[in-house]
Amino acid sequence: MRVVTLRINGDEREIAVRDHWTLLEALRYELGLTGSKQGCDKGDCGACTVLVDGEPTLACVTLAVLAEGREITTIEGLAPRHRASGGEGADPLQEAFDRCGALQCGFCQPGTLLSARALLDRTPRPDREAIRAALAGNLCRCTGYTQILEAIELAAGEAAGVEVPTPEWMADLRRAEGTSRP
Amino acid sequence: MLRLPAFELARPRTVEEAVGLLAEHGDRAAGLGGGTDLVPNMKHKLVTPEVVVSLAAIPELGGLAVAEDGTLVIGAMCPIAKLAAEERVGAGWPAVAQAASLIASPQLRNSGTLGGNVMLDTRCRWLNQTFFWRKSLGFCLKKDGSECHVVSGGSRCVAAASNDSAPALMSVGASAVFVGPDGRRELALEELWSTDGVRNKRCEPAELLVEVRVPPTAAGHRGAYGKLRDRGSIDFPLLGCAVRLDLDAAGAVLDADAVLVALQARPARLRGCAELVGGTTPGSPEFAAAARAVAERAGRKARPLPNVPGDAEYRHAMVPVLVRRTLEAAGAGGGPVHPL
């Protein structure tokens, strides 16, 4: 075992790890940060994506020991980070995902949100092509991606104070909700 | 859940120290770059080193620079994302930048290194699987077994070179610099490969790839990379093709090259490309006819095997298509060719 100090979501956390433990294992099983998901566990699916020094990184193929000294952001850190910078509630991207229904089972969502956050931190108004490219390493088996792309466009537009066209399906949803109500 | 087998992690701070560790532990050691190839392979117990030598704390390996004589010098630990985004690489060596931009996914390009992609282990659908999966088939020729599931009765491993950077770098005459216990040596990337899928690189276990050197390209240089894969977002190549065209002042082809990957254990140069397209001018019917001739030749020469995922017959049919499209893209100063 060796003792390492990991800087996670702005906190310094001292933990004992074995050399062969991945960052994902340290996060989930030593620190209780189970928001980062263990999907394929071999670098394909993107469910374990965290930010390391601001860059989307797969925690399942990163050794915990080698993450020492780097700034790590997990899904648990997004809302506190937003509030620390003067915001209210959750990260606007999380709010937008909620409003757009950009998830079903939610397993890919932490990783997808972190890839999206890294994109908007670097490029505040990405076009759809740039969003698709930034999310290329996050597989979602439920949504078909459309609402994820719309949610990111919505969050980016609102941050810039620009009105974003409401997705067509939202009107259908409202109509359906209206007719189903007594 | 895939656990890593236990190992001891060493974190040398100099190349000499790293080479010393690799030499001391021999076959029981492995060098760790970004971990995007080695870590999954360790999780699948394809490699089970007792000592893993991390190269992350060696600052001199992380560079990306253009030397005074115009040579592009890429440190082995240069992240693939950095190489793909560097404007000077895109301008001077477009095939290299395009290939880098199509390696794996954004997260894997952030962690993965150029040196790691050059040194990528060969891949096969019967190999890159969990230990349990492989064991249930009695393993295979490359690891733990004696039978090849690709070529029945085959005695030679046919796992495929799957590194997109290799053909692109070979198309522009790159060389690899290794440091080993006996000192430093530079060899043309062309010379690095063997046809043995078990170990397709001619270098010693204690030799460390420290940098890749790419000579400057001429004013009329054009290059492109074409990649065929299952999912456009992440996969290894089912087929990759790098093209170089050097044009004279009038715009006619002086020299040309095409290098293919993911067909066999080594990336392979397509012979006779320059003879067929030489003298033609991109955009002309003559160039188009020459590109078709090169493509047909590539299709005749290629023998795709059911080694990497993807139907071998389909990959064979796509060889001439990808070669022709990549030649045309290079001619037009475009690319990459990525039909997804």
Image (tube, rainbow, N blue to C red):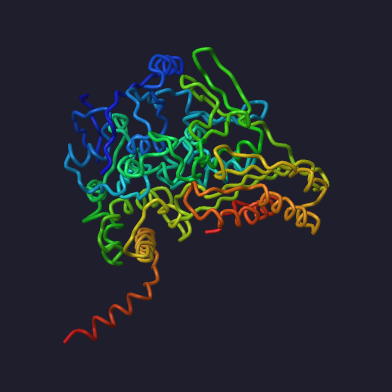
Rendered location of residue B228, percent (x, y): 54, 53
Q: Which residue sits at x=33%, y=78%?
A: A171
Tell me if residue B146 comes above or below residue B279 in the rendering: above
Place of residue A181 in the rendered image (x, y in percent of width and height, measured from the top left):
19, 84
Rendered position, A97 above or below B244? below
Q: Residue at x 47, y 59 (%)?
A: A127
Residue A144 in the image: above or below residue B158: below
Q: On the rendered structure, is B274 left or right of B240?
A: right
x, y percent for residue B175: 61, 28
The residue at 80%/51% (across/down) is B281
In depth, the one of B107 and B237 nearer the eye is B237
Q: Left or right? Give the position of B221 relative to A180.
A: right
Q: Nearer the viewer, residue B124 or A25?
A: B124
Name, please, the residue furthest toward the top. B182
Give x and y (percent) for residue B77: 47, 30
In which quadrant of the rendered image does the N terminus of chain B lie?
top left
Residue drawn at (19%, 28%) of the image? A16
In depth, the one of A60 and A69 nearer the eye is: A60
B300 or B68: nearer the eye?
B300
